[in-house]
Amino acid sequence: MSTRSVFTFGDWTLQPDMEPDAEPVTYAMQCAVCEESSEPGEDVGEAQGWTFRHAGRNPSHHTYRETIVRPWRAWMARPSGA
Ligand SMILES: [Zn+2]
């Protein structure tokens, strides 16, 4: 999964950051009924567990939103004119 774009100032590549020092991918779930949400965490199972606990406490809350934060990095592969 990567994408390239050529601009007047150079040739850029954009890709999900998989480097060891990259920020972690985090997952959170938000209830679409009451807007309450879980804490963002690196374990998607934890976010899904929050959803089950929330639905258990609020049996009429059936719709949720997943928020994924994914780090990306962009770099110039080739300056323009090179
Ligand atoms: Zn709710």
Image (tube, rainbow, N blue to C red):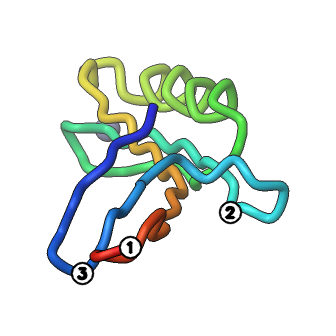
The spot of residue 10 in percent (x, y) is 30, 73
Determine whether, in the image, residue 45 is placed left or right of residue 7. right
Is 48 rendered above or below residue 18? above
Q: Which residue is mark 1?
A: 82
Q: Which residue is mark 3?
A: 9
Is 58 rendered above or below residue 62? below
Q: Locate the N terminus by quadrant.
A: top left
Q: CA distance from mark 2 to mark 3?
A: 28 Å
Determine whether, in the image, residue 9 is placed left or right of residue 43. left
Q: Earlier in the sequence, mark 3 or mark 1?
A: 3
Along the line of sight, the residue nearer the viewer: 11 or 36? 11
Name the element at disc 2: loop
Name the residue located 30 percent from the left edge and 35 percent from the top edge.
65
Q: CA distance from mark 2 to mark 1?
A: 32 Å
Tell me which amino acid carries mark 3.
Phe
**Of the residues tagged 2 and 3, which is closer to the observer?**
3
Name the residue located 27 percent from the left edge and 50 percent from the top edge.
35
Name the element at disc 3: loop
Which residue, as the protein is rendered here, is positioned at the far bottom? 9
Quadrant hosting ligand 1: top left
Name the element at disc 1: loop
Q: Which residue is mark 2?
A: 23
Q: Crowding at label 2, few (<14), some or many (≥20) Cα neighbours within 10 Å?
A: few
Q: Crowding at label 3, few (<14), some or many (≥20) Cα neighbours within 10 Å?
A: few
Q: Earlier in the sequence, mark 2 or mark 3?
A: 3
Tell me which amino acid carries mark 2.
Glu
